[in-house]
Image (cartoon, grey):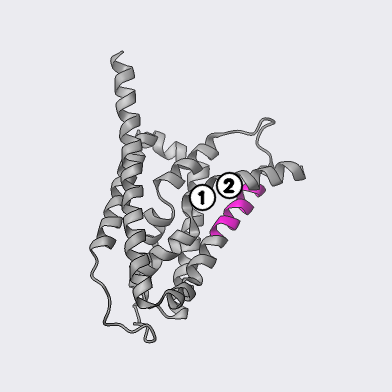
Amino acid sequence: MLNEFAKTVLVIVAALFPIINPPAVALVVLSVLPHMSDAERNELARRICINSFAILLASLSIGAYVLSFFGISIPVLRVAGGLVVAMAGWTLLQAPDDDDAPESAPRPRSGASLRAKAFYPLTLPITVGPGAIAVAIALGTGSPRHGLQPVHLAGVGIGLVLVCASIYLCVRFAGHLERLLGTTGTQVAMRLFAFVIFCIGVEILWLGLSELIASVHLDIK
């Protein structure tokens, strides 16, 4: 039983952590909302963590049924998600430099604005994007060899908690990285990761398109 529990936790963490990439998420948060106070960053990290847990849990448990109900395939999900991610990366690339706000004087933000950005675009699609959702759905549709048992459900829960806790820690302490890099270094890192996000979106889009094109060729044959 303990072996099954550990195996389930490792599968969840190993499958989702590289795709979500919490350290990269922290840098993206810096690019979207720079110069935050510690209280704002803590609140933002908490909300992103909770949102990510809810989306991943829903994808694991009912994601496949939802897509089936609406007649949405995984390739179409990737195309739509890739477009959203690419647009988010492009928007970050085109955002003006914020040189007027000093690093030592964080600008206050309204709670409503922070909550809105915590879900979109910071949770969906930047943190939990179409790739993570597709993997979560695939994990949810796979059944253990000896059938689903309570130990597997517990393992899934702990695995998601570990992944989301890593997201919280990286976002919460992203300010330390901002202070370490300085204003110029932070701007360079923001632009670099904005370009990386744009490339990831194009890659996800192309992957979905390739699968759709391949399916059309098979139907023709």
Separation (CA) of disc 1 from disc 2: 7 Å
Kind of residue at disc 1? Pro
* Front residue (pair 82, 63): 82
Residue 168 appears in the figure: yes
Q: Is residue 161 magenta?
A: yes
Secondary structure predominantly adopted by residues drawn in magenta: helix
Give percent across and percent down for residue 198: 31, 52
Q: Which residues are magenta?
A: 153-164
For disc 1, the neighbor class at 10 Å (few under 14, some 14 to 19, many from 20) is few
Q: Is residue 185 above or below residue 74?
A: below
Q: Secondary structure at mark 2?
A: helix
Write down the quadrant of residue 104 in the picture.
Answer: bottom left
Residue 43's x, y, as percent?
46, 73
Horizontally, is 59 left or right of 208 in the view?
right
Type of amino acid at the residue the image marks with label 2: Ala
Look at the picture and state if 20 lies above or below 147.
below
In the picture, the quarter occupied by the N terminus is top right
- Depth order, front residue of 15/71: 15
Circles 1 and 2 in contact, beta carbons < 8 Å: yes
Tell me if I can see residue 120 in this picture: no
Q: Position of residue 168 (x, y in %)?
A: 52, 65
Please identify the quadrant where the C terminus is shown: top left
Q: Nearer the viewer, residue 22 or 54?
A: 22
Picture residue at 45% right of the left edge, 65% below the top:
26
Q: Residue at x 60, y 57 (%)?
A: 162
Residue 218, compared with residue 84, is above or below; it is above
Question: Mark 2 — residue?
Answer: 14
- What residue sits right under mark 1 in the picture? 18
Tell me, yes or no, whether the highlighted magenta stretch contains residue 157.
yes
Foreground residue, 134 or 86?
86
Question: Which residue is depicted at the point 52% across and 43% down?
Answer: 61
Q: Secondary structure at mark 1?
A: helix
